[in-house]
Amino acid sequence: MQVALCGRRPDKVREAAESLPNNAIGMVADLSTPEGATAWIEQAMAELGQIDILIANCGGPPPGTFASTKLDAFRPALDMNLTSTVAMCYAAIPLMQERKWGRVVAITSISVRQPIPQLILSNTSRAGVTGFLKTVALEVAPDGVTVNTIQPGNHLTDRTRAMGHANLEAATKAIPVGVIGDAEDFGKVAAFLCSEPAKFITGASLNVDGGAYRALQ
């Protein structure tokens, strides 16, 4: 299977593509607008021939509270974290339905279930994409297309490391399993949802957070 990935920075795109096997294709694209998201899918289809699996994963919008966040900040946040995924689904899913096989997995956040303070834009937009994909999952299930979301808690990524040692230690202590998440293990969870054995899992929102989310539902 060949992989196409995208990002806004050519150096980061090249680095990510080179880290993957089977001649992964790195493309420079900006998903922060619906037009950019649609163009990316079209570009990927032109390179790959078809898209069997779509992984939607966009960066988070700026932090802020209700008091500090202006109304006009919501539009770009929704475009990046909600509308971009909607646009990619409209471009990719109908062709999956025609072939009677496809996988869509969106990376959202534990904040969908348990809003994170200071992240009102992310909490709002990621909850929206979760509702959209749950609705789509029910509609396309008869066509052999599964649609799921993964809701990560804290994982050891470059962004997490940038928090500093003290904040990282505090974040780790808040995780019941006692360690921060491993990004490679997280990728394996996503890979499973894209596999044939996961064909009976759709419309699901899976917590991958070391037990950080504590409610019953």
Image (cartoon, rainbow, N blue to C red):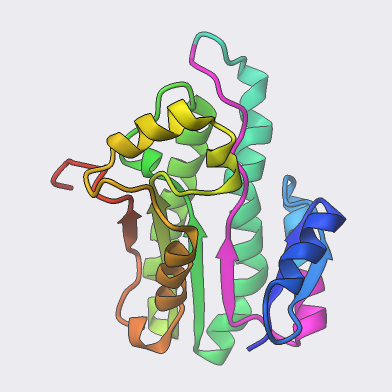
- Looking at the image, is 21 positioned above or below residue 171? below
Q: Position of residue 54 (x, y in %)?
A: 58, 71
Q: Which residues are magenta?
A: 41-66
Q: Position of residue 103 (x, y in %)?
A: 49, 76
Name the outermost residue toward the top: 67
Report if residue 62 lies within the magenta region: yes
Q: Residue at x 58, y 60 (%)?
A: 56
- Looking at the image, is 12 positioned above or below residue 180? below
Q: Residue at x 32, y 48 (%)?
A: 179
Q: Residue at x 56, y 10 (%)?
A: 68
Residue 39 seen: no
Question: In this view of the protein, which residue sits in the foreground, 17 or 129?
Answer: 17
Question: In this view of the protein, which residue sits in the foreground, 143 or 207?
Answer: 207
Quadrant of res 72: top right
Q: Is residue 154 left or right of residue 51?
A: left
Quadrant of res 41: bottom right
Q: Quadrant of the N terminus?
A: bottom right
Report if residue 49 lies within the magenta region: yes
Q: Position of residue 85 (x, y in %)?
A: 60, 55
Q: Is residue 171 left or right of residue 128?
A: left
Residue 155 seen: yes
Quadrant of res 111: top left
Q: Position of residue 162 (x, y in %)?
A: 59, 35
Question: In this view of the protein, which residue sits in the foreground, 22 or 61?
Answer: 22
